[in-house]
Image (cartoon, helix red, strand yellow):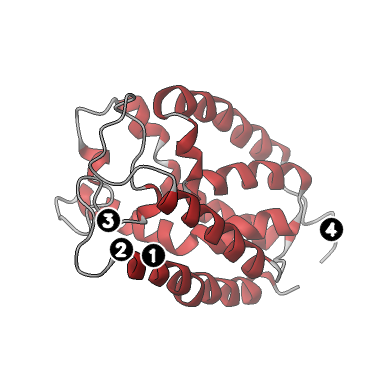
Amino acid sequence: MSSINKTIPLYLKVIFTAFMAVLVPFYWRTYGPSNFLYFCDVALLLTLFGIWTEDKLLISLPAVGILIPQFIWVVDFVAGLFGFAALGMTDYMFDSNIPLFARGLSLFHGWLPFLLIYLVYKVGYDKRAFRYWTVTAWVLISICYFIMPAPGVILENINAPVNINYVFGFSDVVAQTWMHPHLYFASLMIGLPLFVYYPTSRILMRLSCD
């Protein structure tokens, strides 16, 4: 298929850019710069550059990294809409103490994976994405584990994130205790590429048909 037919529509680029023009300053002011260490926020920034350049690698990187986790987010959110407590990762979306505007911005977790699938279909998939995102994830996980605050730490900015990318478990209140923290960290370093990124990469290779 020709590259002309694969061009990303201008209106989509403008809408996504407008969304980012709202989200980035709001997140920076509300949560602080450390919030952009989250995989999902890194994926947003990569998508912003990728959607304008129509670069396969820039589109493929976030697709490999967040498709499976964000689809899990979608399932958990839909379950919450029907009153079922699933994994708890979207409980904050139903917390009336959190401003509706902030929760509305967070809905990007639900539509971003579908947008990335569409973008990969339009521009193709770069096989290098698995390797490059794995290295990116290792760097982010290491920063979050060794430098960023653990669960339960009281920060000056009460909205600042702790336990970024769940490097201490799935709770922002207490760290997991069912294995040694270093072993849990190692399991993330090995398990994410093996069980999340690689399968996603194989699926995207079939979707792209390049």
Which class describes the residues within 10 Å of circle 1: few (<14), some (14-19), or many (20+)?
some
Give 37 or 7, whichever is nearer the viewer. 37
The percent position of residue 85, horizontal first and vertical second, equals 15, 55
Q: Label 1, label 3: how many angstroms apart (C-alpha)?
A: 13 Å
Q: Mark 2 points at which residue?
A: 181
Residue 124: quarter of image: bottom right
Q: Are marks 4 and 2 in contact (CB under 8 Å)?
A: no
Q: Name the residue under label 3.
A: 170
Specify the amino acid type for callout 3.
Phe
Give 166 or 102, whichever is nearer the viewer. 166
Specify the amino acid type for callout 4.
Ser
Q: Do the residues labelled 2 and 3 touch (CB within 8 Å)?
A: no
The percent position of residue 42, horizontal first and vertical second, equals 55, 46
Q: Nearer the viewer, mark 4 or mark 2?
A: 2
Specify the amino acid type for callout 1.
Phe
Disc 1 secondary structure class: helix
Q: Are marks 3 and 4 in contact (CB under 8 Å)?
A: no
Q: Name the residue under label 4.
A: 3
